[in-house]
Amino acid sequence: MELKFLGAAGGVTGSCYLLRTSRHTLLLECGQIQGSKDDEELNRAPFPVPVDEIDAVVLSHAHIDHSGRLPLLYREGYRGPIHTHSATRALCSIMLRDSAYLHEKDAEWENKKRRRKGLPTITPLYTQEDAQAVMALFRGHEYGERNEILPGIELRLSDAGHILGSAIVELWIEDGGRRTKLVFSGDLGYRHSPVMEDPAKIEEADLLLLESTYGDRNHRAFDATLAELKSIFLEAAESGGNVLIPAFAVGRTQDLLYLMAEHYADWRLDRWRVFLDSPMGIEATGIYSVYRHLYKAELFRERQHWPVLPNFEATPTSQDSMRLNEIESGAIIIAGSGMCNGGRILHHLKHNVWRPECHVVIVGYQAEGTIGRRLVDGAKYVSLWHEEIRVDAKIHTVGGLSAHADQQELVDWYRNFEQRPPVFLVHGEDRARKPLAARLEAEFGADVRLPRRGDTIALPAR
């Protein structure tokens, strides 16, 4: 029995791990690499294992850095099952289609330039047809069920508290009379998440794959985050411009809408018009309304499918979106992508980021190489469609709305394990993994490793 690290080992995107036994090969996650153009080109590299050798896929949640290469896997010939939570299956039906649309548009744009230069054209990473076809392979599970997914391999999903349907993955593996239990944390949610439940506690494992996105820091107190958001909206109202919020369509968007409804009066949001300018965010919010039994927040009124927010407006079409660019003041625009590496937020940045009276509120992790990261790092200019745009808008980084657990919460979650299993830190940059490793070693005497892409380890067995 062995495990190979194929992605998100020293970085936070492209989550992918390969489990082999003497009888079966299982792919855990099949995420897309996100970041700079060079980083994203790595998605075109051949899969490091023949697709016809893969017997099953297990997916922790719907975010594209975990699920985004599944349509490519299908196009390469994979026809086995994809096991995940039923809500994740519903979200992937829109997220993978949206991802495919962006790949098609990127290829179309690139090919226009290539034809002018006499260069060979490229194909999209995958198409909307691939994204639709792969959905037939999804097998939905519920939290707490323990099911045999391959002979000798059992699966249980528990609530990770990250986004709708996100799961901690437990795998019981038996191979040639040897047994082991592998636990993958998936992406663990923040304990004070406005909408989601707290992550479930797991007590037993022989080996743990633990995410480490914020392994080097603790989030600020949630009350301080609420106070900061209030001050931003009040300041922005006095400035007389617009507020742009790049937000992931699933998770962060619903958190923001809930908080705006809850604090509508205190934040003086009656002075604003709130737009959700994300077709995927609009569809995802509808899915949240279907699965409202999975979370604690009263995000919707009973029998209604839009958030409880008086001045809320969804703008699904491109014509609706373009009309927002005519608004010079009084608009709060929530749009994707969350890292500003695509989507409608780029158009809104082009029309607003050079205006000193406008504000940009960063509420999520920004990977290296993305425009969002450049804004957080204080860039004076950003390149949008080969045009250098001056950054004069005020940039706010609000860390307390992260959908990921912070260092203390990761340590506390590990504390639940009775026998202190060895830990392999994944889904984190080294600057985040190393401090977390030091704490786990110091407080628990844990055996902690920092795997790299391509590393292979033997699974401990009893």
Image (cartoon, helix red, strand yellow):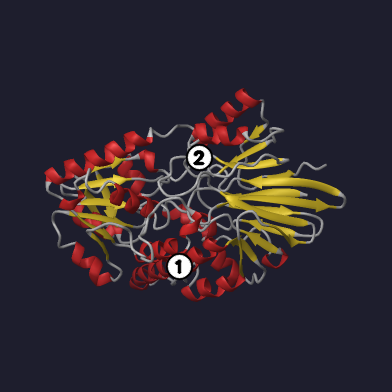
Q: Residue 373, relative to residue 141: is it above or below? A: above
Rendered image quadrant of residue 104: bottom left
Q: Residue 28 or 251: which is nearer the viewer?
A: 251
Whether residue 431 sits left or right of residue 426 in the image: it is left
Q: Nearer the viewer, mark 2 or mark 1?
A: 1
- The reply to whether residue 69 is visible in this rendering is no
**In x, y percent, where is residue 92?**
50, 64
* CA neighbours of label 2 inside 10 A, class few (<14), some (14 to 19), many (20+): many
- What is the residue that sits farthest to the top in this orientation? 442
**Number of dots carrying numbers:** 2
Helix, strand or loop status at disc 1: helix
Helix, strand or loop status at disc 2: loop
**In x, y percent, where is residue 439?**
57, 27
What residue is shown with label 1? Answer: 94
Residue shown at the point (55%, 31%) measured from the top left: 436
Of label 2 and label 1, which has the lower sequence position?
Answer: 1
- What amino acid is at disc 2? Glu
Residue shown at the point (15%, 51%) measured from the top left: 271
Residue shown at the point (68%, 63%) measured from the top left: 56
Picture disc at residue 429: 2
* CA neighbours of label 1 inside 10 A, class few (<14), some (14 to 19), many (20+): many
Q: Residue 165 or 307: which is nearer the viewer?
A: 307
Q: Residue 90, relative to residue 355: is it above or below? A: below
- What amino acid is at disc 1? Ile
Report if the CB atoms under discs 2 and 1 are less than 8 Å apart.
no
Rendered image quadrant of residue 411: top right
- What is the residue that sits farthest to the front in this orientation? 302
- The reply to whether residue 214 is visible in this rendering is yes
